[in-house]
Amino acid sequence: MDDSVLLTDFYQLTMLQAYFDQGMNDEAVFEFFVRKLPPRRNFLLAAGLAQVVDYLENLRFTADDLAWLAACGRFHQRFVDSLADLRFTGSVDAMAEGTIFFPDEPILRVVAPLREAQLIESRLINLLQFQSMVASKAVRARLAAPDRQLVDFGLRRAHGAEAGLLSARASYLAGFDGTATVLAGRRWHIPLFGTMAHSFIETHVDESKAFLHFARSQLQATTLLIDTYDTEAAARALPPLAGQLAAEGIAIQAVRLDSGDLGEHARQVRAILDSAGLTEVRIFASSNLDEDSIAALVGCGAPIDGFGVGTRMNTSADQPYLDCAYKLQEYAGRPCRKRSEGKATLPGRKQVFRRVAPGALHRELAGDTLGLANEEQLGTPLLQPVMASGRRLAALPSLAESREYARAQLATLPPMLRQLEPRNDLAGEVELSAGLLALARRMDELPAD
Amino acid sequence: MDDSVLLTDFYQLTMLQAYFDQGMNDEAVFEFFVRKLPPRRNFLLAAGLAQVVDYLENLRFTADDLAWLAACGRFHQRFVDSLADLRFTGSVDAMAEGTIFFPDEPILRVVAPLREAQLIESRLINLLQFQSMVASKAVRARLAAPDRQLVDFGLRRAHGAEAGLLSARASYLAGFDGTATVLAGRRWHIPLFGTMAHSFIETHVDESKAFLHFARSQLQATTLLIDTYDTEAAARALPPLAGQLAAEGIAIQAVRLDSGDLGEHARQVRAILDSAGLTEVRIFASSNLDEDSIAALVGCGAPIDGFGVGTRMNTSADQPYLDCAYKLQEYAGRPCRKRSEGKATLPGRKQVFRRVAPGALHRELAGDTLGLANEEQLGTPLLQPVMASGRRLAALPSLAESREYARAQLATLPPMLRQLEPRNDLAGEVELSAGLLALARRMDELPAD
């Protein structure tokens, strides 16, 4: 990860210089939240907290950074010198990774001296919005195919290295079974999957020989890619190959389809394999899939056991960003409220209280109250202390633990939120507390400046 | 940059193990190309070559990587040992960064021993597709506003750290004037821009005091953000402030608008400033802009001098990926052709020949011929040698030089390609040479396997 403190917006530094000159460094409260639900999301899934905590614990200007700042012509030396001892000394309260959340609900609150809380804005948004966006996209594929294997195939078209790594992490958190990205598998203990590329077939003059060569070299049962020339012809050639390999003690686990009408090919290939007794060989499909095409394939009964999901998931292609913000809610004990057209914020330190109630089959999410942090409200407070005095209070959950937590969260989804299509009533899950509404009203009565 | 050799797909390693077992490591030829033009792009702009060359020159497995591979249970020791001396020893021919290109045209060709050429696939696509995608998006904002200031504001919603950095680079290449991302400015000498955030205003009880504090702390003329509470009220309060600051020798360079109807606010603010004699104070606008909203603002005569363009540009929001591939075209002297439905490739080593002819006002792009590398064709061959024996042949152009080259390329765009709307004739700019067509036909007559 490229966690240089200079991975920030230039205005953070120009503002810090002004704060320094004014001696303004009182306690500031910022909250990160999403303003609006994208048209085709019924809920969002929080992700990225672990990377934020790592970033905050390591925040510092190197001597090299300071020399560059002093030389760039925009900052005076006393200010640059003041940055040498800057560390993150504040506190963080946040929703656990894997928590379901809704618009306007803060998923993370920072309380810190102003210069620290301001400087971190750009990278903190960069980390939280990307992983939450990918997790909120990937979870839809999981809802579309609860019992199929789902594997992240998207490194190549992810937006750079970190996007490839973090989208592997976020999709695993959201319920994927693994990734093809080796470094992500290594870093976070995510199960690794991989088959073969068309190029492997093409380097051989004979497709069957390519299959034999590949299968004999692997230490596990293999998946063979069968669409390079003619999918059904390749499937028909498999039974004698499988017999030959079985005699050598080598199993074929699956075939992969990567082009054409995947449902139709799967049906034909399934019939060919079954009629030859290869009922144990699974069918794996890939090719620009997303939750909608997966739902369509599952819905029409395509005999596909697993899906490789890439580009559209890793880039959240139908919605490649969340309308999110990290906003000042309080400075030096005074609540703040931005009132820009269409971008007004809710003032004060807030808390999200979640109510869960018995549903048709299990306990269901019944609604959230967005209130002030010091209010008493029904429900479980979702923002919990994570850091104090600049250090984590306890070890964060492992990725596997967060994935289990996300699974438990998803079990509370009522049917209306579980469907892929937008819900058809417009009522939100979130109500504002009386205390929060009263504070917002009080602030609107104050003069603007 | 996270350039670990393990930033790759798992199947590259399983294939490499099979190649190792078979002793297959003859010369392979791979080409990177885009299959289809996105619906709202009339051309693409090549970018990312510099990062690819860095990656290839540094490709190696560390002792730590090898130990992990040996322990992960999927690879045998002799294969893992064989990776210790793996380096990229091949050659690369490529289009210069900033070159206009079209579908099916390779923008980069790798010729290398099979294991090297295969292993690099994932990261090579990851680097080329992202920067080419962003450059091809950003250039549209430049075409929409040829004479306005354009600044990249998108770090926070870019997909991770590297996406933030590389989108700053790609947009500058495509003609932007600078970026707000400090680390990108530092790394590639891109001019840095930054104003202030709403939080700066809100930490002060009085908006005017916030403006004074900020302006007095900056070493250059400043830009003031005036939409936190009431845009026109803030504009009306500026003239006395400007006078006070002028007496101190401090200039206000611009005001920034960030919400509401930007065109209408700009007109009102311009009138307020002009009537007070502040005709030199420029107006800068931001708020979820893209080439369409910029074109609309420019088209209706909004008095806006510069635009901060973020999320929609950095994520290429209307088209967050290119349908691209890195495909084997030749192995051990034998041309290869994948024939999967809808994904068939053109075989052999290819070259793109560009014809430029006198147009209405200047020399215009007249068309490309996609031919075989050893064919003679009219036009300039766009793929030029960049690396041989694993090392760069000469220093690559600086980013500033590539930006100048892109500007010269854009000057050759005929009006039909220069417009934002899709061209209304369907004829492509690319014709296939007789030699390439003959080779493709010959290969289709060969048996599939």
Image (cartoon, coloured by chain):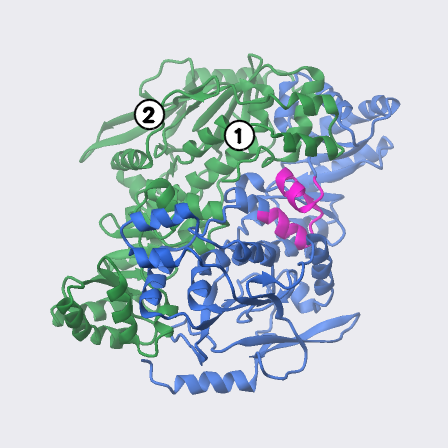
Chain colours: A green, B blue
Which residue type carries mark 2?
A: Arg
Query: Between B139 and B85, which is closer to the camera in this rendering?
Result: B85
- Does the segment drawn in magenta span residue A344? no
**Which type of secondary structure does the marked residue at label 2 adopt?**
strand
Q: Which numbered tag is attached to residue A268?
A: none
- Which residue does the image show at 35% across and 32% down from the upper left? A99
Q: Residues within 10 Å of mark 2 (few under 14, many from 20)?
A: many
**Which type of secondary structure does the marked residue at label 1 adopt?**
strand
Q: Is residue A171 visible?
A: no
Which residue type carries mark 1?
A: Tyr
Q: Where does residue A100 sit, x and y in percent of width and height?
A: 35, 34
Q: Quadrant of residue B91?
A: bottom right
Q: Which numbered tag is attached to residue A326?
A: 1
- State left or right for residue A383 relative to residue A33: left
- Does the segment drawn in magenta span residue B191? yes
- As displayed, is residue A262 above or below residue A94? below
Q: Quadrant of residue A448?
A: top right
Q: Specify the segment rendered in magenta.
A: B166-192
- State left or right for residue B319 relative to residue A247: right
Q: Earlier in the sequence, mark 2 or mark 1?
A: 1
- Which residue does the image show at 24% across and 58% down from the upper left? A219
Query: Between A249 and B230, which is closer to the camera in this rendering?
Result: A249
- Which residue does the image show at 55% across and 62% down from the upper left? B390
Q: Where does residue B25 sit, x and y in percent of width and height?
A: 41, 70
Query: Between A434 and B370, which is closer to the camera in this rendering?
Result: B370
Q: Which numbered tag is attached to residue A354?
A: 2
Query: Between A301 and A128, which is closer to the camera in this rendering?
Result: A128
Q: CA distance from mark 2 to mark 1?
A: 22 Å
Q: Where does residue B383 sit, x and y in percent of width and height?
A: 61, 70
Q: Residues within 10 Å of mark 1 (few under 14, many from 20)?
A: many
- As displayed, is residue A232 above or below residue A263? below
- As displayed, is residue B187 above or below residue A296? above
